[in-house]
Amino acid sequence: MAWLTDPLRYSFMLTGLLAATLVGLTCAVLGVYVVLRRMAFIGDALAHTILPGVVAAYLAGWNLTLGALAAGLLTALGIGWFARRQALREDTAIGILFTGMFALGILLMSTVRSFRDFSHILFGNILGVTAGDLWLMAGVTALVLAALWLFDKELELTSFDPTHAEAIGLRADLIRYGLLGLLALTVVTGIQVVGVVLTSALLITPAAAASLLTNRLPRMMALAAGVAVSAGILGLYVSYYFDVASGASIVLACTAFFGLAWALRTARGGR
Amino acid sequence: MLKNTRSLFPWLCLTAGLLLAACQGAAPTPAASGRLTVVATFSILGDLVQRVAGDQVELLVLVGADGDAHSYEPAPTDTRALAEAGLIFENGLGFESWLDDLYAASGSTARRVVASEGLALVAADAPGEFDPHIWQSVPNARQMVKTIQAALADADPAHAGVYQANAEAYLKQLDELHAYILAQTASLPAERRKLVTNHDTFAYFAQAYGFTIVGDALGGSTTEGGEPSAAQMAQLADAIRAAGVPAIFAENVEGSQTVQRLAQETGVKLGPPLYTDALGRPGTPGETYLGLMRYNAEAIVGALR
């Protein structure tokens, strides 16, 4: 059992494991709705749109995380707005906003004339998570879980049967804004762990794995959370023992769990 | 619809052809002032060139203060600068990995002067490669100044006398700086002369002033390597504890999150950020090479004492 406790001698491993657990939990639970509503692209989009917020905050000397949050929420609102008007399909709105925002980020970065401080945004740095970051992650986790618990009926109805939801007087657009807002918060914390490029994996892969094994929402969420948290822990141990990048290890662990779920489903005769 | 698209095709071909012709017609233009136009790839080298050239040349520096030459992305103005240059100063040793492409694309015919030529080099981790951070030792800078002087005199013989006088005056200042750093570091007991920095930049400093490099947070001589794995963090934390390093240092061109985390982990002091691959912005102690080296030496000795 020494191999299990040996890495825990280091405080950066403890904070890393805690961060992976918090972020994995939030991403997985919210990810179930992302997968059910066929919004898989959104995690990637929100992660990329955070770049201009971070760079602008850096240039103005503000807190980088707050800049990220502002950019993420702004994009979430923008996507909701364009899609609400029905003038554009949601995937088109996402495609336009996310590339535009990412390009703005790169343009701002080129005014600094160096990529100083930004590399850990692209690739994540779970081993550099500070106590302040942990508090933010815990706050986001609490908020997301509370929101899902309070509004689970509304979310479930609008996800599965939007027409019926409208008929009984639910404001589907308000719920969509709320969900997008929660996603923006979650993605900002996900970037700390695996970076811009891989954040959507935390959102989608565990939820997709869970959706292969069950149709019942509470069970699906529990399974997804289990997958995400185990993948986080497994990935960090792999990074420790095999000397490889931690963010990529975590994402690949998620992918492996998805493969396992697929095999299980096939073995059970589910096609 | 299809017909419309087809009828567009000749126009597209014509536009593309015109654009191509326009690109090939672009030729380098001489500097308006008639002075020699010189490009230096990054701020520290630019400062050395400026000291020798004085106001005889038009100097353009590509990667400016606080900029990171390792992860630099050139802009169109840089291509134009190269095209118009009469002389280009570079560090060499793979420090400006983007320069070869930029030089070819600019169509420049200017002579490229490699400032690291003729120096005794420290081997890097990869076989056949050398540590590019040569300016961290003042004797190296001395040699670079001589290379710069020779190249300027060669390109602009009319002002050779000015370049020589400027170089001699500056070499005197470099000698004083070297003596000062030697005196500073000599006041530090040998067992405290241990360096842990963000990326691997202080090999020449360590060699010239008698320090041991215990390790670096990013695990490499460039800032591009991404973040360290959990295994690398653990090894470095162990090495810091085992060597009894009194303090570790961040740097001016890269974020310090990993170094901060390491300081927390090991409980050692986090020293002030050192100037590594670029001058500081105007108004900071590191705005010149002389100021940068003096500041680094004082910061290192102060934190390790």
Image (tube, rainbow, N blue to C red):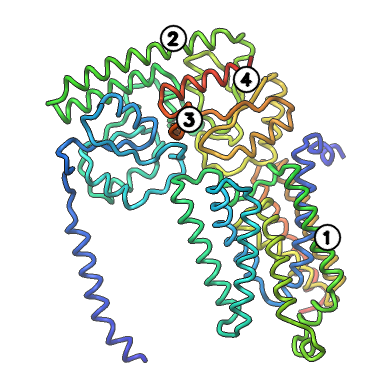
Q: Nearer the viewer, residue B299 or A128?
A: B299
* First in sequence: mark 4 vs mark 3: 3
Q: Position of residue A202 (x, y in %)?
A: 71, 60
Separation of marks 2 and 3 at Cα, in angstroms: 23 Å
**Residue marked by disc 3:** B284
Marked residue chain, label 4: B
Separation of marks 3 and 1 at Cα, in angstroms: 51 Å
- Secondary structure category for the residue under label 4: helix
Q: Amino acid at mark 3?
A: Thr
Q: Amino acid at mark 1?
A: Gly
Question: What number is the disc on residue A36?
Answer: none
Q: Check chain identity for marks 3 and 1: say if they share one.
A: no
- Secondary structure category for the residue under label 1: helix
**Relative vertical location of residue B80 with respect to residue B252 in this rendering, above or below:** below
Q: Position of residue B288 (x, y in %)?
A: 41, 27
> Which residue shows up at 36% across the image and 33% down it?
B92
Q: Quadrant of residue B40?
A: top left
**Relative vertical location of residue B225 with respect to residue B200 in this rendering, above or below:** below
Pointers 1 and 2 in contact (CB under 8 A)? no
Q: Check chain identity for marks 2 and 3: say if they share one.
A: yes
**Residue marked by disc 4:** B303
Question: What number is the disc on residue A226?
Answer: 1
Which callout, 1 or 2, points to the residue nearer the camera?
2
> Which residue shows up at 27% across the image and 77% down it?
B12
- Secondary structure category for the residue under label 2: helix
Q: Quadrant of residue A258?
A: bottom right
Separation of marks 4 and 3 at Cα, in angstroms: 19 Å
Q: Position of residue B37 (x, y in %)?
A: 22, 38
Separation of marks 1 and 2 at Cα, in angstroms: 62 Å
Marked residue chain, label 3: B
Tell me the quadrant of the picture where the N terminus of chain A can be found. top right
